[in-house]
């Protein structure tokens, strides 16, 4: 069946379409109710179905002859570490860890925070939680203690699973002090902390609540899978919103499994047994969906790569991994490709490797600029497909369709056509669908397909306010964009205070809260400016308290440290500028969008409500001396 007919079926009779797709996974109780609305009026998929996601990812494959196939390959250029886990091995490790967690009182519905680097144990941990019907919340290792504390207070975990250290290229980053600091800052009391000790740095475990991972797992008895409802949460993944408080995106078990399984054949053209590699981190949604759950539910071999596209050891690192494991489908962020292009512009390092296994490259996480797309197409000579999604959707909403191996035309700058199930609309301020070519807010007509967030963790009102209230009958994505005459959508960027730094989603209001806390700062605005490598980087514009004469350099040094300490190094906050005033509307709203256009040297529209036009010239004069693109 061709894309067009699949797409029409998926939206014209969504229940029938998804009832068929649901048959591709092994339920304990097949769902009869396909799409329902709960007491809050929110849509729920497969509400009477019973299943276990770990069973789908492991036990099912072992029972169906895949026990000896590689499930997980760990490749770590930063430690020279390497390991292969067959489905049998991964099941054994997971079932034992689940037993250990169960002996600590973890069971159905309990929350477990996982704050770990890219090592196999993080995958065991996620799957072990799923096995028990517990809810995991993975926190990206690049976040600092305060961010971890916010998540502890929101998710209220019984246990934190962590490791003694992460490694960033050649830096050893101890994790335990961050966990200790977060626990002392959080109001919620965590019962136990389990630490996986890595050879390059061992953490001191001195308190009663601190346990050694290996000792615990060694003595544990393997346990089976707890059946859960399709609508029970599998995980909570926090993401940046427009306030300093992260949003706890809930992912349910049933819709998630059905959607991910479907995405592997529909979008990625992957079959059971294929080698699939998503070069991301399990702390992000790409890692959840396409390092762990989708490839394993599909019976693929997945790769867990503890390294970077460059410097570990060079810009040929990705090509080496693809050749070593005969990767068929590869997924990364455009920023990773830009990093390679910067260091190896001719792509000479690729020539050392046999990349004949590679069929497709998928890019997401940020808009893919045309130059990067074309450079990659020329280098690899395979289809390079930009596709668009977000933590909330859990799987792609736009992608260039592929019909039986034939790729629809790839249009540079566009993230493709709607994936079956997603009715992608471009809306004006009043919620009317705009004509083709006109730019507006990108929204998804309800109901969204399975796999998308049903709500926020224990915050249904916030869910409705953040996503549903702006355009009744639609989910608002936070992105702007337009569609062309052929139905291709072009995502032009966030229209809220969220920025995308090296494919990492961050909130500028979060950073503003930190900057504003500096004793010399009267007020500030943090905006995302264009950057050649990372897509965007944050820049702070600061107005000093009167009488304060701190120098720009000294203030910048303080602010960089404060953002690193409170939000994390991953924010890449490296630049702040002192200005006399910030441009505002007469009602006092800072004109961040206009500032962004000035900083990016792009034309902008001056709102009629501006308080004082001359401030824009002052901002322009400050920005003129800067080279943000190369920060
Ligand atoms: N734990 C601790 N610190 C981390 C971290 C982690 N898991 N990940 C990143 N950091 C730190 C880095 O060490 C760096 O710190 P520094 O300022 O002290 O050097 C900082 O956070 C910024 O890291 P990063 O954004 O990775 O920048 P980089 O200059 O080290 O590397 C790229 C640049 C482009 C190579 C890198 O960002 C990259 O590979 N991006 C791909 C992103 C991606 O996969 N996104 C997922 C969505 S698909
Ligand atoms: P995250 O939730 O971290 O996955 O970030 C999601 C956001 O990243 C989206 O709302 C977009 O702003 C941006 N994004 C992701 N993929 C793309 C893409 N292919 N093109 C443009 N923007 C993208």
Image: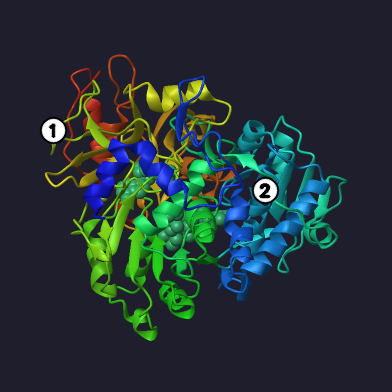
Residue 42 coordinates in the image, percent (x, y): 46, 25
Q: Nearer the viewer, residue 560 or 309?
A: 309
Residue placed at 32% from the left, 69% from the top? 341
Q: Look at the numbered disc 1 and say if its residue's Cβ is closer than 8 Å to ligand 2.
A: no
Residue 198 coordinates in the image, percent (x, y): 72, 65
Residue placed at 72% from the left, 57% from the top? 95
Q: Is residue 264 left or right of residue 375?
A: right
SS for callout 1: loop
User: In this rendering, is residue 511 above or below 269?
Assistant: above
Which label sits on residue 144? none
Q: Nearer the viewer, residue 15 or 157?
A: 15
Quick check: can you spot residue 621?
no
Query: Which comes sooner in the sequence, label 1 or label 2?
Result: 2
Residue 577 coordinates in the image, percent (x, y): 38, 40
Count how many numbered circles sit on residues in the image. 2
Picture quadrant of residue 83: bottom right
SS for callout 2: helix
Quadrant where the image shows the N terminus:
bottom left
Q: Where is mark 2, residue-wise? A: 129
Q: Look at the numbered disc 2 and say if its residue's Cβ is closer than 8 Å to ligand 1.
A: no
Q: Nearer the viewer, residue 79 or 125?
A: 125
Residue placed at 24% from the left, 23% from the top? 429
Q: Nearer the viewer, residue 179 or 238?
A: 238
User: In this rendering, is residue 53 above or below 499?
Assistant: below
User: In this rendering, is residue 129 above or below 318?
Assistant: above
Q: Where is mark 1, residue-wise? A: 435
Quick check: can you spot residue 32?
yes
Quadrant where the image shows the C terminus:
bottom left
User: In this rendering, is residue 284 above or below 280?
Assistant: above
Residue 437 coordinates in the image, percent (x, y): 13, 39
């Amino acid at each position: 069946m061709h894309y067009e007919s699949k797409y029409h079926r998926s939206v014209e009779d969504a229940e029938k379409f998804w009832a068929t797709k649901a048959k591709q996974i092994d339920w304990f109780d097949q769902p009869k109710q396909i799409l329902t609305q709960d007491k809050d009026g929110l849509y729920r998929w497969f509400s009477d179905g019973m299943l276990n996601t770990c069973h789908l990812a492991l036990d099912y494959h072992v029972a169906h002859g895949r026990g000896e196939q590689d499930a997980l390959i760990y490749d770590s250029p930063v430690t020279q570490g390497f390991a292969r886990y067959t489905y049998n091995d991964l099941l054994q490790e997971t079932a034992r860890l689940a037993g250990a967690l169960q002996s600590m009182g973890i069971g159905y519905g309990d929350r477990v925070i996982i704050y770990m680097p890219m090592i196999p144990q993080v995958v065991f941990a996620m799957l072990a939680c799923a096995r028990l019907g517990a809810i995991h919340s993975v926190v990206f290792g690049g976040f600092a203690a305060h961010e971890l504390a916010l998540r502890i207070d929101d998710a209220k975990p019984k246990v934190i699973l962590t490791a003694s250290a992460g490694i960033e290229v050649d830096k050893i980053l101890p994790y335990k002090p961050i966990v200790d600091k977060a626990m002392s800052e959080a109001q919620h009391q965590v019962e136990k902390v389990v630490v996986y000790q890595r050879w390059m740095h061992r953490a001191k475990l001195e308190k009663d609540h601190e346990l050694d991972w290996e000792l615990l797992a060694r003595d544990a008895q393997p346990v089976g899978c707890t059946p859960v409802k399709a609508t029970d949460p599998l995980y909570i993944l926090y993401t940046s919103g427009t306030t300093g408080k992260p949003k706890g995106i809930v992912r349910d078990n049933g819709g998630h499994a059905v959607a991910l399984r479907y995405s592997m054949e529909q979008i990625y053209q992957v079959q059971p047994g294929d080698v699939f590699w998503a070069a991301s981190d399990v702390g992000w949604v790409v890692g959840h969906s396409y390092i762990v759950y989708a490839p394993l539910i599909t019976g693929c071999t997945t790769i867990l790569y503890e390294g970077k596209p460059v410097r570990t050891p060079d810009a040929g690192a990705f090509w080496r991994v693809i050749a070593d494991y005969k990767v068929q489908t590869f997924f990364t962020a455009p920023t990773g490709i830009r990093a390679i292009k910067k260091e190896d512009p001719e792509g000479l390092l690729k020539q050392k490797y046999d990349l004949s296994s590679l069929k497709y490259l998928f890019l997401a996480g940020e808009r893919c600029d045309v130059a990067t797309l074309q450079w990659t197409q020329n280098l690899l000579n395979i289809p390079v497909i930009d596709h668009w999604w977000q933590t909330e959707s859990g799987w792609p909403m736009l992608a260039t369709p592929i019909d039986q191996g034939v790729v629809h035309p790839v249009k540079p700058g566009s993230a493709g056509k709607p994936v079956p199930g997603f009715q992608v609309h471009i809306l004006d301020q009043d919620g009317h669908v705009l004509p083709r070519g006109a730019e507006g807010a990108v929204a998804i007509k309800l109901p969204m397909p399975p796999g998308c967030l049903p709500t926020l963790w224990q915050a249904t009102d916030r869910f409705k306010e953040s996503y549903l209230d702006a355009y009744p009958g639609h989910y608002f994505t936070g992105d702007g964009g337009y569609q062309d005459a052929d139905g291709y959508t072009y995502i032009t960027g966030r229209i809220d205070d969220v920025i995308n730094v090296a494919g990492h989603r961050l909130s500028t209001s979060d950073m503003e809260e930190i900057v504003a806390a500096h004793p010399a700062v009267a007020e500030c605005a943090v905006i995302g400016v264009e950057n050649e490598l990372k897509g965007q980087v944050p820049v702070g514009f600061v107005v000093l308290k009167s009488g304060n004469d701190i120098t720009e350099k000294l203030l910048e040094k303080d602010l960089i440290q404060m953002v690193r300490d409170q939000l994390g190094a991953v924010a890449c906050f490296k630049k702040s500028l002192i200005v006399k005033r910030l441009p505002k509307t007469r009602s006092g709203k800072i004109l961040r969008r206009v500032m962004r256009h000035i900083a990016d040297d792009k034309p902008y529209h001056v709102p009629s409500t501006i308080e004082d036009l001359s401030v824009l010239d002052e901002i322009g004069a400050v920005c003129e001396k800067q080279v943000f693109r190369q920060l």
